[in-house]
Amino acid sequence: MAYGMTQAAEAVGTSVKNRQRWKQQYTQTGSVNEVLKTEERTERLRREVKQLQWEKDILKKASAFLARDM
C-alpha cells in the first residue's frame, strides 16, 4: 500500500509541512546525518542566543542600577 504525503506524515507523528521540509533538506544534502547535524547546530545556536540575551539584560539592569546610585 502506498502512502500519500499526509498519511506518511501522520504515520511518523508529524505535520505535512515538517515532512516536506525534511524531504527538501535530505535531497539538498543527500544525507540524514547532515540534516541532523544542521538541526543540532541550529538548536545549540538558539540556546546560545537566549543565554546571551539574558546576560545582556542583566548587564543593562546592573548599569541602570549603578547609574542611579551616582
Image (tube, rainbow, N blue to C red):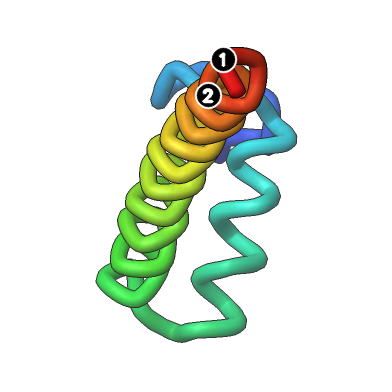
**Label at residue 69:** 1
Query: Which residue appears at 52% of the width and 24% of the height?
Result: 66
Image vertical order of residue 66 relative to residue 39, above or below: above
In the image, residue 45 above or below residue 27: above
Pinpoint residue 58: horizontal percent, then vertical percent.
47, 26
Q: Secondary structure at mark 1?
A: helix
Horizontal and vertical percent position of residue 35: 41, 67
Q: Nearer the viewer, residue 68 or 18?
A: 68
Q: At 60% from the left edge and 42% from the top edge, which residue is drawn?
A: 19
Q: In the rendered view, does 67 fall on the left or right side of 30?
A: right
On residue 17, the disc is: none
Residue 59 in sight in this render: yes
Residue 6 lies, in percent from the top left, at 68, 26
Query: What residue type is disc 1 on?
Result: Asp
Question: Label 2 amino acid?
Answer: Leu
Q: Which one is nearer the viewer's eye here, 49 or 27?
A: 49
| Residue 54 as seen in the image, left or right of residue 65 | left
Task: Please give the name of the residue rendered at 39% of the width and 48% of the height, measured from the top-left corner.
Answer: 48
Quadrant holding the C terminus = top right
Name the mark on residue 66: 2
Q: Give the mark toward the camera: 1 or 2.
A: 1
How far, Cα to Cα, is label 1 from label 2? 5 Å
On the image, which quarter does residue 30 sit in?
bottom left
Above or below, 67 against 25 in this view is: above
Q: Nearer the viewer, residue 24 or 59?
A: 59
Numbered-mark total: 2
Q: Are marks 1 and 2 in contact (CB under 8 Å)?
A: yes
